[in-house]
Image (cartoon, rainbow, N blue to C red):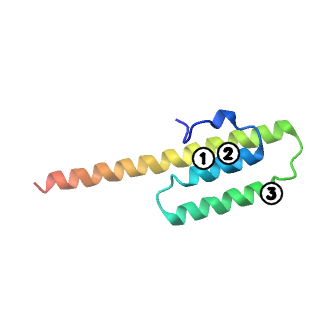
Amino acid sequence: MPPLVGPELIQTPVQLYRYLLRCCRQLPTTAMQQHYRHTIRQGYNSHSDEDDPERVQMIIQRAIADADWILDKVRTKAFYSSCSSLNKSTLQL
């Protein structure tokens, strides 16, 4: 499941940059958000001179897949931690 609506509409590096920054808002802690915002900014700056349209599309696809993976990992961890706390509270009854 894509983290936000419209990842298939991303065609330019600027659109990708904005999309990834919006994805950062879904991360649970401020420290994680700052870390990934910094990483996104570095990646954008390091690839800003890329001219090959095929390479740009490949970078866009990979960045979206990586964002999906990170957000799924965070959601899974949150789900399991909530299940764990639910089980502990059930055991205390």
Amino acid residing under circle 2: Ala
Residue 11 spot, x, y in % from top left: 75, 37
Q: Measure how far apart labels 1 and 2 are at the Cα level.
A: 6 Å
The residue lying at 54 percent from left, 42 percent from top is: 3
Position of the C terminus by quadrant: bottom left
Q: Earlier in the sequence, mark 3 or mark 1?
A: 3
Amino acid residing under circle 3: Ser
Name the residue nearer the viewer: 9 or 86: 9
Residue 21 spot, x, y in % from top left: 63, 53
Crowd rating for badge 2 (residues with CA inside 10 Å; few <14, some 14–19, many 20+): some
Q: Measure how far apart labels 3 and 2 are at the Cα level.
A: 14 Å
Report which residue position mark 3 lands on. Answer: 46
Image: 32 above or below 61: below
Report which residue position mark 2 lands on. Answer: 63
Report which residue position mark 1 lands on. Answer: 67
Taking 15 as reference, is 46 left or right?
right
Q: Earlier in the sequence, mark 3 or mark 2?
A: 3
Amino acid residing under circle 1: Ala
The residue lying at 66 percent from left, 63 percent from top is: 38
Q: Measure how far apart labels 3 and 1 are at the Cα level.
A: 18 Å
The residue lying at 64 percent from left, 42 percent from top is: 64
Crowd rating for badge 1 (residues with CA inside 10 Å; few <14, some 14–19, many 20+): some
Residue 9 spot, x, y in % from top left: 68, 34
